[in-house]
Image (spheres, rainbow, N blue to C red):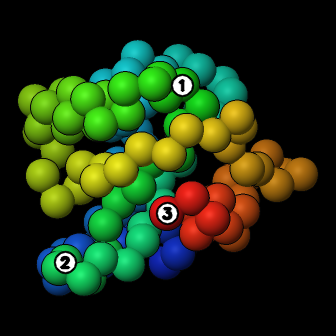
Amino acid sequence: IEGRISRFSKIAGEMVPHETVEAAVNKALGLDQETERRIAIVGVPDEQKGEAIVLLSTIAGPALEQECIDLRYKLLDEGLPSLWCPKLIIPVPEIPVLASGKLDIKGCEAVVKRDV
């Protein structure tokens, strides 16, 4: 397992790397050539599985529930385990990043806490 520990979720006893999920989502949405960050994965507490995956997205449309279902099928077709698929999509105007250009994990978590 590589990466910052805050970039993992423990779902049903399995460590889920957020960066791997982000790469799969970017590919599924055709964003893998984008230079600007358009999505971010955040873990949230879940009573059944311990944690759940939430997707912050700057490209989410009005039919979020259907988009989440469609994305789930695309990710499953790409071979991503079902536990790794986002449970919820939260539309945001921009993904929080630090001055260094790295993902602002605390900022993303604050957005999720505010909106969930």
Image quadrant containing the N terminus: bottom left
Q: Up-down: is 63 above or below 80?
A: above
State the image coordinates of residue 66 (x, y, percent, origin top left).
26, 29
State the image coordinates of residue 22 (x, y, percent, origin top left).
42, 44
Q: Up-down: is 111 above or below 38?
A: below
**Mark 1 crowdedness (10 Å alpha carbons): few <14, some 14-19, many ≥20:** few
Q: Up-down: is 72 above or below 61?
A: below
Q: Is residue 33 left or right of residue 17?
A: right
Q: Is residue 108 left or right of residue 45?
A: right
Q: Is residue 98 left or right of residue 8?
A: right
For residue 59, which numbered disc appears in the image? 1
Q: Residue at x 20, y 35 (%)?
A: 69
Q: Residue at x 82, y 55 (%)?
A: 98
For residue 116, which numbered disc appears in the image? 3
Q: Is residue 34 left or right of residue 3?
A: right
Q: Residue at x 38, y 78 (%)?
A: 45
Query: What's under tag 2, amino acid-wise?
Result: Lys
Query: What's under tag 3, amino acid-wise?
Result: Val
* Cα distance between the residues tagged 3 and 1: 18 Å
State the image coordinates of residue 14 (x, y, percent, origin top left).
19, 75
Query: What's under tag 1, amino acid-wise?
Result: Ile
Q: Tell me which numbered mark, 2 or 1, is placed earlier along the sequence.
A: 2
In terms of secondary structure, where does tag 3 sit?
Answer: loop
In terms of secondary structure, where does tag 1 sit?
Answer: loop
Q: Residue at x 59, y 20 (%)?
A: 34
Task: Residue under label 2, please give it.
Answer: 49
Q: Tell me which numbered mark, 3 or 1, is placed earlier along the sequence.
A: 1
* Cα distance between the residues tagged 3 and 2: 17 Å
